[in-house]
């Protein structure tokens, strides 16, 4: 099959998803993309931009299916695109959604972007979500939103979207674990965006409560409004820090995962959790809250904490006595060599070519 893939925000997990799938897919892809910045403008104008680009394309008839991320206003795109493209079976993929993506204050949320997500889902033949948590949080927020509309004309919309929904987790690139663990105390890794929804305040407060010695690496992308707790923690942690800040290359990022014993999340919001899965493939034991998408990814209940500092102290003591207990969950089924065929099968089913 020949897939037209539209990505208005071609960076981070969005870019990694398409790269991983294309590299392992049995299908052919034509990707139209835009750089990963000014996301609000991308959601506003990408439909017009891509439709104009395709109007100048000479081989519109060769495409079998249109796939896009939810950063595209798919309904607008179908209204503007050449008729050969508008008529294609279509899939929209939600890496995140704009009704429950974290904002600093509730009044800052622009629900028009959530409505764009809604109309895009209605315009698609199938709606893919990276997790059930993402789907359920969106549909729950959408029910609350449409209930506010006078006369309630849209109350059936969440159910219609649910009926065409599929959970299709992204794949990950496997990272080989280090054969021999470096000596020293428990090495704790925190790998997430340096933003408030990842709850860094709790992470650093729990490190202060630990009684056992430890080392720590705090990596991830920082932004203009980085929470002040990071600079304060950097001073307090001192020589216990192994790595700090954004890792500029993939090799350095993978090295950070291999060096650590455990990866910790304190997130209040996480639509999937790729960095956790990658760290587990590199040999880390996950230490996670029992919420968000994490219970979907891991069935081993021993990895979930109630008291984070106590949980980490226990692991530090176990490490002192020998190896940490293995995580019984395996992540191989998330590797792209397995995930891509699953996605390939599903797009053939959407296109009516399966069986």
Image (tube, rainbow, N blue to C red):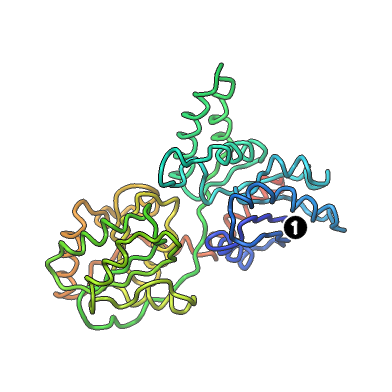
User: In the drawing, does residue 172 fall left or right of residue 122?
Assistant: left
Give residue 55's position: percent from left, percent from top: 84, 52
Residue 66 visible, this orientation: yes
Residue drawn at 12 percent across, 67 percent down: 211
How many numbered discs sit on the rendered protein?
1
User: In the drawing, does residue 342 fall left or right of residue 215?
Assistant: right
Residue drawn at 71 percent across, 59 percent down: 32
Residue drawn at 57 percent across, 63 percent down: 11
Toward the viewer: 339 or 32?
32
**Quadrant location, the N terminus:** bottom right
For the residue labelled by badge 1, is the local secondary structure a helix, a strand or a loop? strand
Toward the viewer: 120 or 99?
99
How crowded is the residue under tag 1: few (<14 C-alpha within 10 Å), some, or many (20+)? some
Q: Quadrant of residue 201?
A: bottom left
User: In the drawing, does residue 97 fall left or right of residue 349?
Assistant: left
User: In the drawing, does residue 63 fall left or right of residue 299?
Assistant: right
Give residue 67's position: percent from left, percent from top: 67, 51
**In the displayed structure, would residue 151 be above or below residue 19?**
above
Give residue 53's position: percent from left, percent from top: 79, 56
**In the displayed structure, would residue 10 be above or below residue 136?**
below
Q: Dot 1 corresponds to which residue? A: 2
Residue 355 visible, this orientation: no
Give residue 219's position: percent from left, percent from top: 38, 69
């Amino acid at each position: 099959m020949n897939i037209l893939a539209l990505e208005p925000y071609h960076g981070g997990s969005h870019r990694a998803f398409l790269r991983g799938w294309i590299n392992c897919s049995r299908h052919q892809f034509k990707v139209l993309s835009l750089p990963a910045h000014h996301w609000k403008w991308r959601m506003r104008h990408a439909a017009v931009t891509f439709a104009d680009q395709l109007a100048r394309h000479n081989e519109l008839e060769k495409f079998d299916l249109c796939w896009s991320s939810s950063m595209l206003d798919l309904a607008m795109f179908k209204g503007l695109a050449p008729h050969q493209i508008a008529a294609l079976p279509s899939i929209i993929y939600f890496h995140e959604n704009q009704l429950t993506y974290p904002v600093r204050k509730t009044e800052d949320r622009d629900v028009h972007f959530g409505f764009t997500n809604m109309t895009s889902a209605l315009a698609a033949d199938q709606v893919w979500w990276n997790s059930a948590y993402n789907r359920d949080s969106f549909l729950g927020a959408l029910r609350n939103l449409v209930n506010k509309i006078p006369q309630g004309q849209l109350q059936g919309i969440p159910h219609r979207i649910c009926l065409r929904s599929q959970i299709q987790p992204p794949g990950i690139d496997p990272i080989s674990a280090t054969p021999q663990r470096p000596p020293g105390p428990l090495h704790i890794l925190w790998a997430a965006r340096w933003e408030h929804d990842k709850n860094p305040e709790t992470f650093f407060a729990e490190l202060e409560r630990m009684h056992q010695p430890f080392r720590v690496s705090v990596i991830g992308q920082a932004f203009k409004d980085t929470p002040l707790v990071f600079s304060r923690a950097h001073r307090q942690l001192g020589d216990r820090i192994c790595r700090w800040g954004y890792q500029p290359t993939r090799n350095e990022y993978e090295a950070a995962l291999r060096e650590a014993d455990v990866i910790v999340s304190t997130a209040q919001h996480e639509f999937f959790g790729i960095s956790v899965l990658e760290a587990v493939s590199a040999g880390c034991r996950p230490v996670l809250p029992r919420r968000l998408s994490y219970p979907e990814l891991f069935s081993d209940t021993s990895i979930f904490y109630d008291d984070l500092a106590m949980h980490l102290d226990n692991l530090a003591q176990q490490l002192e006595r020998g190896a940490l207990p293995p995580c019984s969950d395996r992540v191989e089924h998330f590797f792209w060599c397995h995930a891509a065929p699953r996605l390939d099968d599903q797009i053939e089913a959407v296109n009516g070519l399966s069986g």
